[in-house]
Amino acid sequence: MLWRLLRPYLGPRTGPIVLIVVMLVGQSLGNLYLPNLNADLINRGIVRGNLGYIWATGAEMLAVTLVISAVAIIGVYWASRVSMSVGADLRRDVFGAVQAFSLRDMSDFGTPSLITRNTNDVQQIQMVLQIALTMMVVAPIMMVGGMIFAIREGARLLPLLAVAVPLMVVFLAVMMTRVVPRFRVMQVRIDRITQVLREQITGVRVVRAFVRGPDEARRFDEANSDLTATTLSVNRLFALMMPTMMAILNLTSVAVMWFGGRLVAEGSVSIGNLTAVLSYILQILIAVMMATMLVIMVPRAMASAERIAQVLAATPSIADPPTPRRPAHVDGAVELAGVHFRYPGSERAVLEDVTLRVAPGQMSAVIGGTGAGKSTLLNLVARFLDVSAGTLRVNGLDVREQSREQLWSTIGLVPQAAYLFGGTVASNLRLGAAEADDEDLWRALAVAQAADFVSEMGGLEAPVDQGGTNVSGGQRQRLAIARALVRRPALYLFDDCFSALDAETDARLRAALPAFTQSASVMVVAQRVSTIMGADQIIVLDEGRVAGVGSHDDLMAGCDPYREIVLSQLGPVA
């Protein structure tokens, strides 16, 4: 899975990878050449007392060392560039895939898991690629080349390697089979701790208001303990790995010195050749140790690659048509004919046989009890969800025949939970229209009844914290309304976004809104009857069905569910 994931990203970087390989091959050959020079220096220089040969060979060894250092620096530099750029491309593609997800897809993966996959998981792959581009090339060359040179310098000591190297390989294979499943579990544990931490930070006021701090601390401790236990189980295996590898390395070195010393005493091997053989054996075993480092990283990267591949391979439940059509005219008209919607796995439909029309230049309000399907209706219009049956047209064209970006470009949405991004008032408002000038922004703020408090904050460049936590709920809603107004779309969707406004501000906003949105279609979901009494058309939803459509007076006369809502809120005077 790791190779299948990385192959498309490594293809365009073939040039730098070839350069890295050339550099590392040169580095490895230089490292293999040094013990040979050292053996000659001992045999022909030190043993014979030839000072000139010692100086000449020493200078050659110094030159080779400098070349090796320069080549190693170049190789590591390009390996870092390749691995970092691949990581950047992976993050970009994961982000792009998530942007195409529908609300259902997001809930299937979970927000904490998607965050972890685009941060921690990509980082694991990035790290293993960096190590692979350096060690994966060097290790086999050092191992094979070391064996060849060791045979040439002292073939009688080679049986020692025939025991040590297979022993290391078998040990590493056993470790791999034990470590990979644990790394998969570890990534899931990281997802869980991210979820708990995110919920506690986001919902800190709820936690404090209900005095649930100790309970949340216990929940975090459980997630933390699970991650700690899994990490410890992995680290225990690694704690066994390194001492075992070092023990094999040191025992092999001792065996070489023991048996090699006897061969030197017999005169069958020179002291220089023994030194070279020892160096080559150490290089072989160090190459195995380098492979061990890669083995340590690969299992976790494999688990991360599987998780990233799941995101990249996921087919969004809502996608653009192969050949999107553009509406002939953009007027914001909305038409629903026999629309049904059921959430996957739900026993009953949220919306059943909904048929209605929202005309341009009119304000259409949607009201109903909790769970009646009001917000779901707006999500269908914006195509955050797809209808289960029936037809939904916006701008005279079925939403499933349009590209989503084309559809969204004609909509100004104010969600039920108003969200502001970190930045300034101006940067948040210009999310609606990047080209809007300051005059446009102030005009929208005035209609949204937000101009006064924005002036008190310091104007358009006043800072806004992430999530809008430095402003009140009502101010946050008014800024979100202003953001939609700046866009001047053909269709406004207000999803119960007046709930945090006091009655006076609500009345002023409703009075200013028609003049600003006079040529557009407006759909307002509301809980308060006072907010929508003056609407051109009121749509009453009752248990997912349209119970009535008409003006306030018409519905009071002929729609029992609407009359019950009005009487419960305003009393008999309504």
Image (cartoon, helix red, strand yellow):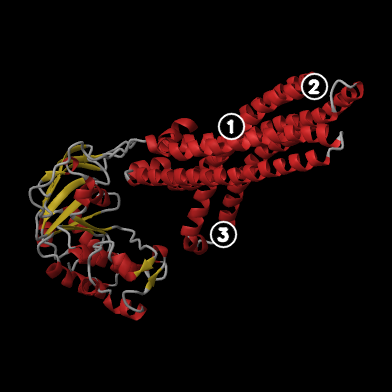
| Residue at the spot of label 3 | 213
**Upstream in sequence: badge 3 or badge 2:** 2
| Residue at the spot of label 1 | 180
Using a 10 Å C-alpha cutoff, classify the residue at mark 2 as few (fewer than 14 neighbours), some (14 to 19) or many (20 or more).
many
**Upstream in sequence: badge 2 or badge 1:** 2
Q: Position of residue 277 (x, y in %)?
A: 77, 28
Among all residues in the image, which is located at the extreme right?
265
Q: Position of residue 309 (x, y in %)?
A: 43, 35
User: Of the residues shown, which amino acid type is indicated by label 2?
Assistant: Leu
In the image, what residue occupies the spot 23% across and 51% down?
378
Left or right: 117 in relation to 509: right
The correct choice, above or below, for 36 with respect to 570 in the image is above
Left or right: 135 in relation to 9: right
- Quadrant where the image shows the C terminus: bottom left
The correct choice, above or below, for 417 with respect to 180 in the image is below
Q: Are marks 3 and 1 in contact (CB under 8 Å)?
A: no
Camera-nearest label, 3 or 1: 1
In the image, what residue occupies the spot 23% across and 65% down?
435
Mark pair 3, 1: CA separation: 36 Å
Q: Are marks 3 and 2 in contact (CB under 8 Å)?
A: no
- The image's mark for residue 157 is 2
Mark pair 3, 2: CA separation: 67 Å
SS for callout 2: helix
SS for callout 1: helix
